[in-house]
Image (cartoon, helix red, strand yellow):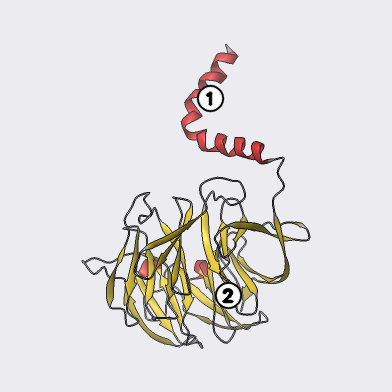
Amino acid sequence: MLGRLIRAAMLEWLPYSFPLLMVASSLLAAAPAPIPLGEVKHLFDLEMADELHMALPTDVAIGNDGRIYVVDGGNHRVIAYDRDGKHLFSIGKRGRAKGDFLWPLGIATDKDGQVYVADKSNKRIQIFDPDGTFISSFLVRFRTGGIGTPIDLAVSKKTGLIFVTERERHHIMVFENDGTPLGGWGKEGVNLDEFRYPATIASHEGLLYVVDSLNTVVKIFDERGQFQFQIGEWGVLPGQFFRPKGIAVDDRGWSYVSDGYMDVVEVFDDQHKFHHVIATNGKKHKFYSPTGMAVDNQNRLYVAEQLGNKVSVFELQ
């Protein structure tokens, strides 16, 4: 009788546990193979500003003067630090007024050091100068009508165009620097030019790297929206993703992808081939729900750890 009850319970839960069973079997299959590791040096963590600790940080961007800007989403603000991690100032508070935020998520800087923030629940992009002074904002309006929900954004250093990942229509929206909508591409789906909850986005040398979260890949497009390449696939083995969250690209064209469920950062070379997993002290580095990332021109990697309530800073070897 007990055996029949156990078998019945297993059958009842099988549809829900199937992905976990696949993960477990993949882990068992992968056990004999060592994971390629890439050693980095942990420099410091950004955890506190003023009297407040960070709460659910989601993204980080670097200004052209080396300043570090962190989206402190749980506190509805952006925090600025100098290159050594000293707190400089904070931008905004919870609210709908100019310069305030309601659950901000993504952040980017342009070639002039201006700071762009995806103010998610206010459905707008806000722009600040490098010292945190409000410049302007615009609603993320679709060219065909309606207002979207912005998740992240990237600013092209070549054209100045603003590219926004949007969650309602699973879309990449394109804007002039003044907020004029130019169109975009994508819809919900699994094809190469479709998305299921596009998340973070990075711009590098005229290419856009988009984390397609539920399709568990990174898709690369040119600025016209033409598909170029795909990084990764679903899985838990090296070079695969279970739930990718963040993307950053260094000066060599190497990509860094955070996996928010596996708590790792994977690195791909300039040919988009898997190379290694970030490691410290000879072991795979344990992150706590890593999300948005940045790489500066001094070969430093910045990783926002959403559930760790900090940004970890590393020197790449």
Q: Residue furthest front?
A: 271
x, y percent for residue 99: 41, 81
Work out whether residue 147 can be spotted: yes
* Quadrant of the drawing holding the C terminus: bottom right
94 relative to 273, above or below: below
Residue holding disc 1: 10
Which residue is rendered at x = 60% and y = 77% of the image?
Answer: 296
The quarter of the picture where residue 183 lies is bottom left
Q: Label 1 to label 2, Cα distance in Å?
A: 50 Å
Residue type for callout 2: Asp
Q: In the image, which is nearer the foreground, mark 1 or mark 2? A: 2
* Quadrant of the drawing holding the N terminus: top right
Label 1 environment density (alpha carbons within 10 Å; few <14, some 14–19, many ≥20):
few
Which residue is rendered at x = 61% and y = 35% of the image?
Answer: 25
Residue type for callout 1: Met
117 relative to 66, above or below: above
Label 1 close to label 2 by CB (< 8 Å):
no
x, y percent for residue 82: 62, 83
Work out whether residue 306 can be spotted: no
- For marks 1 and 2 on the same chain, the one whose residue lies earlier in the sequence: 1
Q: Nearer the viewer, residue 107 or 111?
A: 111
Q: What is the count of numbered marks?
A: 2
Which residue is rendered at x = 72% and y = 40% of the image?
Answer: 32
Which residue is rendered at x = 66% and y = 79% of the image?
Answer: 85
Q: Residue furthest top?
A: 1
The quarter of the picture where residue 156 lies is bottom left
64 relative to 281, above or below: below
Q: Considering the numbered disc 2 on the image, is that residue within a helix, a strand or a loop? A: loop
Label 2 environment density (alpha carbons within 10 Å; few <14, some 14–19, many ≥20):
some
- Label of residue 218 in the image: none
x, y percent for residue 97: 37, 79
Residue holding disc 2: 251
